[in-house]
Image: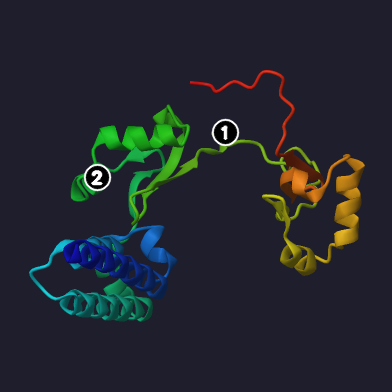
Amino acid sequence: MQVYFELLGRTFMAFIALLLVSRILGKQTISNMTFHDFATGIMMGAIAANLAFNRQFPAVYFLICLVLLTLISYTSSGISLKFPKTRHWLSGAPTVVIDKGNILEANMRKIHYTLDSLNQSLREKDVFDLNEVDYAILETNGQLSVKKKEQFRSATKQDVHIKPSHSILPIELVMDGQILHRNLDQNHISEEWLMQQINNKGKEAHDIFYAVKSTNGNLIFDYYQDELSNPIDKE
């Protein structure tokens, strides 16, 4: 029984340690992963796994390793911000793979990027014809950025002389039957106004699963009881 409690404690400790390290290193570690972030993430996972399950060594050894890894990663991130050459070595640099509609074979060979990978990435950008591409750049996180030729770009409101309408960020007002008073206060929305809108629907706050003020200012409600006559789970 003692072994199970020890495993439980070490696993919880590993989770808390990983959470703290991730918070310290910032969102970059879990978003656009570069070479530096990839190496940090792999090492963090390996150390945390050993902390949770490797009973041959005291837990404090792995905690020390995590602290050292955090310091190394944090320091190298600071250095890369200050020195561009170091940043290119740690995080890599974007690579142009298509320039003015021409595929740069030498650049693709240099980064071991195949035509199959290029075509797949283009299809993911809704590009099925190479003739549509003006520039394509492989970013440091492995994503392909594509600039289409002028004649293949989607028309914008400015192109067709439509005045863009003003929009706001969606504001969540009710979640799981609870009014989000903080969101009301931050956006200068009165609770009385919200309750009036809810009452106009013949509902109470506890009847609402989710309510949000959309980007165009309209209120959208989703109720606990959706009143579907024949609800169906799609397989």
Residue 206: percent from the left, percent from the top? 76, 48
Can residue 2 be seen by looking at this rendering?
yes
Q: Residue at x 78, y 63 (%)?
A: 184
Q: Is residue 156 left or right of residue 32?
A: right
Q: In which quarter of the image is the N terminus?
A: bottom left
Label 2 residue SS: helix
Nearer to me, 146 or 150: 146
Residue 181: percent from the left, percent from the top? 75, 64
Label 1 residue SS: helix
Can residue 214 be seen by looking at this rendering?
no
Kindly report which numbered mark, 1 or 2, lies closer to the viewer in this rendering: 2
Nearer to me, 144 or 158: 144
On screen, residue 112 above or below 48: above
Say which residue label 2 marks.
108
**Residue, far left:** 56
Name the amino acid type tagged 2: Met
Say which residue label 1 marks.
151
On screen, residue 111 above or below 117: below
**Residue 122: which quarter of the image?**
top left
Nearer to me, 110 or 77: 77
Name the amino acid type tagged 1: Gln
